[in-house]
Image: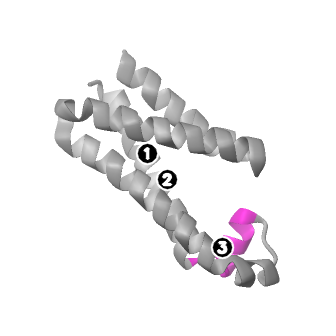
């Protein structure tokens, strides 16, 4: 596996740790409100749902870290979790906000391409 692929996988994993923090701990704080364009009222009402969503992002990050830890033996693990990120990003871009395509789906697609080289 190339260094570039490893770097991209690591960055995608770190991005999902950041999303976990935003959704689980900062959802109704100024940083979370700004990141997701929320009103304080909506954030308060949806805090539990956002925390659940954040937990799923943590699982994606954990899978990518696991794949990195396994090195070349973790190729299929990295591909699986990057595909999960890509599908989530495509769905989110289609249903919630088009920015998600660039923030989540595009980096996952780049990682998959680099892993395939």
CB within 8 Å, label 2 to label 3: no
Write down the residue under mark 2.
15
- Measured along the vertical axis of the image, is residue 45 above or below residue 2? below
Q: Write the start and end of the magenta stretch as one range.
A: 26-36
Tell me the crowding category of disc 1: few under 14, some 14 to 19, or many 20 or more residues within 10 angstroms, Cα based.
some
Q: CA distance from mark 1 to mark 2?
A: 6 Å
Percent position of residue 76, x then y = 29, 31
Which residue is more in the foreground, 44 or 36? 44
Which badge, 2 or 3, comes first in the chain's sequence? 2
On the question of residue 22 being in view, the answer is no
- Asked which quadrant contains residue 46, the reply is bottom right
Task: Characterize the magenta stretch by its predominant secondary structure.
Answer: helix
- SS for callout 2: helix
- SS for callout 1: helix
Q: CA distance from mark 3 to mark 1?
A: 20 Å
Tell me the crowding category of disc 3: few under 14, some 14 to 19, or many 20 or more residues within 10 angstroms, Cα based.
few
Write down the residue under mark 1.
11
Write down the residue under mark 3.
31
């Amino acid at each position: 596996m190339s260094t570039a692929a490893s770097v991209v996988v690591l960055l995608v994993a770190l991005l999902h740790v950041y999303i976990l923090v935003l959704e689980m701990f900062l959802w109704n704080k100024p940083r979370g409100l700004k990141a997701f364009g929320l009103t304080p009222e909506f954030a308060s009402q949806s805090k539990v749902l956002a925390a659940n969503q954040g937990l799923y992002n943590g699982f994606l990050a954990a899978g990518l870290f696991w794949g990195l830890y396994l090195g070349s033996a973790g190729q299929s693990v990295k591909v699986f979790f990057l595909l999960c990120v890509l599908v989530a990003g495509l769905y989110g871009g289609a249903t919630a906000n088009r920015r998600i395509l660039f923030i989540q789906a595009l980096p996952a697609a780049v990682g998959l391409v680099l892993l395939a080289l």
